[in-house]
């Protein structure tokens, strides 16, 4: 079991490294003010990369390191440090000329060449790519990368739904902790599944069309902020 | 919310049963647009689909195909009624959105392609699955996509302008979302679908 956890931990660290992003605390990762009645409440979310975070019983905040979350991240959570979420720009009236510009390329779980294009969003149901994923569905490039690089185990993690189109799914866990510092007791209070659709047909630049859209399953609008702000994105 | 198709396709078990048929008809519509072939209507209200195809010389045929028959088998059947051609060899490998200035039948082919390749819109995108009842087109201006919603005694015909379909990606999501937003007070269309009174809304108003 430890071996499995260590491997998963390496995967999470690699995920953060591959994305080239610093781990930052979301606004939701805030401790309650100190005081005699303080329960030390902390909330955060984490992408389930298969590291084994228990969903049916509690664990301690310090155990996050066993599930691949860096110790510094856990200590920041313990201290209640956070940063503000980004504000999304407004929708476009018409498709911009640079909508097919590639903004990111990466390998999916199986080493396939995935792509994210700038895309656009009309404020309703029209659009594709990062602009729509970000503005309509409140998901980030890193969320799409994580979903395609570390889809849920089993056949439903990556599924073909068209001649060259694949859907990927992974879970994001919302966690609530109470207690003191890294010894807080934590439990998973909510789970959302992120679905990302990738069209692997190539455009004239020789690269895949890439991400058509990504959303929280069953949610045609915005995913909750806590999904976007997962600590390992 | 459902995480699985209501009736999975054999070819792609994560797709709805009609996805292979609509995808194959998209390929045929693309390959045969210059021949005047129009996949006029795809009815999915019964277990076996019904497909109406016609040509400018008045020729027409109605098929009741296995939804997974495949492009070659469909072409064989259609070829007995009028000219039909397969898509380019790289059809499944190259992204072929025809663009806003393409002929209407090519833009319609792209609409069919996008509906067929994102059938998750009908079960995973929304809180409760919705059903695709019918796709039809006038061949020049519009395509109507009929949707049945859960626990509703009516259907919605979402009318998309072909002018806006030359480049649309994932249009199925927009269609489903528009159908769910249709109010009960929306005027009824003239023809019911599957016995359901049917409301008509425009996709672009969503």
Image: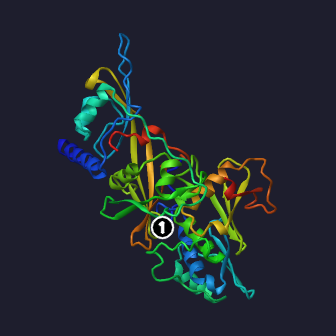
User: Left or right of B162: which side holds A149?
Assistant: left
Residue visible at 55% across and 66% down in the picture: B114
* Disc 1 target residue: A162
Q: Quadrant of residue A5?
A: top left
Q: Where's residue B41, x and y in %?
A: 68, 72
Q: Relative to A204, is B185 above or below?
A: above
Q: Where's residue A177, x and y in %?
A: 35, 26
Q: Relative to B92, is A140 above or below?
A: above
Residue visible at 42% across and 48% down in the picture: A140
Q: Quadrant of residue B7?
A: bottom right
Q: Where's residue A169, x and y in %?
A: 41, 52
Mark 1 surroundings within 10 Å by alpha-carbon count, few (fewer than 14), some (14 through 19), many (20 or more): many
Residue visible at 70% across and 48% down in the picture: B152
The residue nearer to you, when weighing B5 against B127, is: B127
Q: Secondary structure at mark 1?
A: loop
The residue nearer to you, when weighing B203 against B70, is: B203
Q: How many marks?
A: 1
Residue B97 visible within the image: yes
- Residue at the front extreme, as displayed: A97
User: Left or right of B17: which side holds B54?
Assistant: right
Dot 1: chain letter? A
Q: Where's residue A107, x and y in %?
A: 32, 60
User: Left or right of A12: which side holds B192?
Assistant: right
The residue nearer to you, when weighing B87 against A159, is: B87
């Amino acid at each position: 079991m430890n071996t499995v956890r260590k491997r998963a931990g390496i995967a999470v660290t690699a995920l953060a490294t591959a994305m080239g992003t610093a781990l930052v605390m979301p606004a939701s990762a805030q401790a309650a003010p100190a005081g005699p009645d303080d329960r030390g409440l902390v909330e955060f979310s984490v992408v389930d990369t298969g590291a084994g975070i228990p969903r049916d019983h509690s664990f301690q905040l310090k155990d996050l390191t066993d599930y691949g979350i860096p110790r510094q991240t856990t200590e920041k959570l313990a201290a209640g440090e956070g940063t503000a979420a980004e504000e999304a720009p407004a929708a476009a009236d018409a498709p911009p000329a640079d909508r097919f510009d590639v903004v990111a390329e990466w390998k999916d779980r199986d080493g396939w060449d995935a792509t994210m294009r700038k895309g656009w969003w009309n404020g309703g149901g029209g659009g594709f790519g990062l602009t729509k994923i970000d503005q309509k569905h409140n998901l980030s490039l890193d969320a799409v990368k994580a979903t395609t690089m570390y889809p849920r185990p089993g056949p439903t993690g990556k599924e073909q739904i068209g001649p060259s189109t694949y859907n990927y799914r992974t879970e994001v866990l919302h966690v609530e902790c109470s207690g003191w510092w890294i010894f807080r007791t934590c439990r998973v209070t909510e789970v959302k599944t992120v679905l990302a659709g990738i069209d692997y047909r190539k455009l004239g630049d020789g690269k895949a069309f890439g991400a058509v859209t990504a959303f929280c399953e069953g949610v045609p609008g915005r995913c909750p902020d806590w999904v976007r702000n997962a600590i390992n994105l | 919310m459902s995480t699985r198709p209501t009736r999975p396709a054999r070819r792609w078990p994560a797709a709805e049963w009609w996805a292979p048929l609509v995808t194959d008809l998209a390929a045929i519509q693309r390959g045969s647009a210059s021949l005047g072939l129009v996949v006029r209507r795809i009815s999915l209200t019964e277990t076996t689909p019904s497909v109406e195809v016609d040509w400018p010389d008045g020729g027409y045929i109605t098929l009741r195909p296995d939804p997974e028959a495949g492009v070659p088998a469909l072409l064989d059947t259609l070829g007995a009624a009028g000219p039909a051609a397969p898509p380019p060899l790289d059809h499944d490998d190259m992204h072929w959105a025809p663009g806003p200035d393409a002929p209407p039948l090519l833009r319609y082919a792209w609409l069919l392609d996008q509906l067929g390749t994102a059938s998750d819109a009908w079960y995973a995108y929304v809180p409760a699955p919705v059903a695709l009842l019918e796709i039809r087109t006038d061949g020049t201006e519009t395509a109507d996509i009929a949707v049945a919603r859960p626990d509703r005694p009516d259907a919605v015909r979402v009318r998309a302008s072909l002018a806006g379909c030359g480049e649309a990606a994932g249009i199925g999501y927009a269609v489903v979302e528009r159908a769910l937003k249709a109010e009960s007070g929306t005027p009824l269309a003239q023809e019911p679908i599957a016995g359901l009174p049917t409301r008509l809304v425009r996709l672009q108003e969503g």
